[in-house]
Amino acid sequence: MEKTPNPNAFEFFENVAQIIEQARKFVGRTTDLTMCIAYFEIGCLIVEEEQGGRARAEYGKGLLKQLSAFLRARFGKGYSVSTLTNARKFYQTYSPSISQTLFTK
């Protein structure tokens, strides 16, 4: 049978619980930032490979469809052609204002 905690222990328990809650929030923000950087880098690679750095892709190459199939086979859901298209658009939109990402530092 568990002992009833000391009434003064409640503040201690709350402090420990708050640390856990803060850590969970931090992990979520860190994960979001990391994925944001990853999609920026993926978009950069797509632009360089498919477009040779040009603003528009050569149509008919099918690179995104092939890449999507490869990534889904390796990692599962989350790498559709539309997701990869959005990564490319994300890179094209923000690359002028982002000179260097955390991955390249």
Image (cartoon, rainbow, N blue to C red):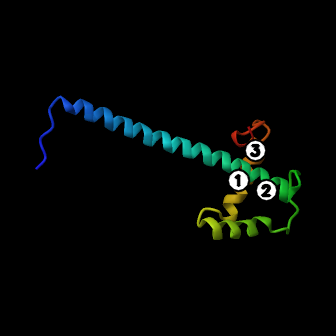
Q: Position of residue 89 (x, y in %)?
A: 74, 51
Amino acid at pointer 3: Thr
Secondary structure of residue under mark 2: helix
Mark 2 and mark 3: Cα distance apart in space: 14 Å
Residue at image point 72% right, 39% down:
101
In terms of image quadrants, where is residue 66? bottom right
Mark 3 and mark 1: Cα distance apart in space: 10 Å
For label 3, count other residues whose C-alpha is less than 10 Å away and answer few (under 14), some (14-19) or many (20+). Answer: few
Question: Taking 87 as reference, is 14 left or right?
Answer: left
Q: Nearer the viewer, residue 13 or 79?
A: 13
Q: Position of residue 21 (x, y in %)?
A: 38, 40
Q: Which residue is mark 1?
A: 87
Between discs 2 and 3, the one toward the N terminus: 2
Q: Which residue is mark 3?
A: 93
Residue at image point 14% right, 33% down:
6
For label 2, count other residues whose C-alpha is less than 10 Å away and answer few (under 14), some (14-19) or many (20+). Answer: many
- Above/below status of 79 relative to 89: below
Mark 2 and mark 1: Cα distance apart in space: 8 Å
Residue at image point 62% right, 49% down:
35
Number of the label disc, if any, that sits on residue 46: 2
- Above/below status of 97 relative to 89: above
Q: Position of residue 55 (x, y in %)?
A: 86, 51
- For marks 3 and 1, give the one nearer the viewer: 1
Question: Taking 19 as reference, is 71 left or right?
Answer: right
Amino acid at pointer 2: Ile
Between discs 3 and 1, the one toward the N terminus: 1
Secondary structure of residue under mark 3: helix
Contact between marks 2 and 1 (CB within 8 A): the answer is yes
Q: Nearer the viewer, residue 27 or 82?
A: 27
Amino acid at pointer 1: Ala
